[in-house]
Amino acid sequence: MKELKPAILMLLLFTCICGGLYPAVVTGLAQLAFPFQANGSLMTDATGRAVGSTLIGQPFSDPRYLWPRPSATAAFAYNPMASGGSNLSPAAPVYQKTIDERLDRLHAARINGSIAADLLQASGSGLDPHISPQAAGVQIPRIARARHMREEKVAAIIAAHQQDRQFGFLGAPRVNVLAVNLALEAISP
């Protein structure tokens, strides 16, 4: 019984410190130092309404928008509760059928030539919000036609939202699909 009282007191003390005080301090510091990131990196439309996060991809299929990388999440595309890739082998017939269907969709939208792999293959998480500059570039004529804009204007919007390698050497250049689509919508709804 003598050891039980200190054990219970330590449990209560560490519960208050680790379960209350520490999370409150870290949350407060995050809100002060990085408010955009601490609140989910949410993007808003012209009316100020939150429409998505810069960290999670969204499905866009309208020809007026930049199309994202395909998603392989279960139940529905870009489902954050089912993050993961398809786990299909490139030698699997189902995989080849999926790639062929995606390629047919791109060709039907008059996207031809050298098509970047990220327009055909889902990412490992199935939630990737970015595509390569090459994948964005092949979509410029389709978006320009659908929005009755000059291709140069669409290219400039995409270039303005291109992100370089992190710290100059990590990863690859990328384009955030949601950011481009919000910019397109602001210019030509």
Image: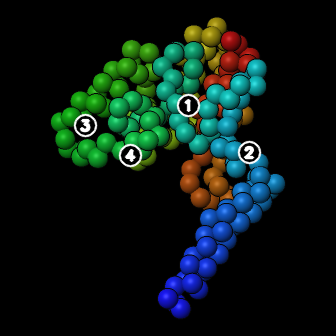
Task: Name the front one of labels 1 and 2.
Answer: 2
Residue 136, numbered label: 1
Tag 2 residue = 36
In which image quadrant can residue 185 be found? top right
Viewed as shown, does residue 26 lie left or right of 75? Answer: right
Tag 3 residue = 95
Tag 4 residue = 84
Q: Report helix, strand or loop for mark 3.
A: helix
Q: Which x, y percent locates residue 43?
A: 69, 33
Residue 129 versus residue 153 in the image, above or below? below
- Tell me the amino acid under the disc marked 2: Phe
**Looking at the image, is mark 3 or mark 1 earlier in the sequence?**
3
Residue 92 versus residue 181 in the image, above or below? below
- Tell me the amino acid under the disc marked 3: Tyr
Q: Which x, y percent locates residue 158?
A: 66, 30
Q: Give the CA distance from mark 1 to mark 4.
A: 23 Å
Q: Which x, y percent locates residue 183?
A: 70, 25
Q: Report helix, strand or loop for mark 2.
A: helix
**Looking at the image, is mark 4 or mark 3 earlier in the sequence?**
4
Q: Give the CA distance from mark 3 to mark 1.
A: 23 Å
- Tell me the amino acid under the disc marked 4: Gly
- Tell me the amino acid under the disc marked 1: Ala
Residue 174 versus residue 157 in the image, above or below? below
Q: Give the CA distance from mark 3 to mark 2.
A: 38 Å
What is the crowding at mark 2: few (fewer than 14 residues within 10 Å), some, or many (at least 20)?
Answer: few
Residue 24 versus residue 149 in the image, above or below? below
Viewed as shown, does residue 105 lie left or right of 20? Answer: left
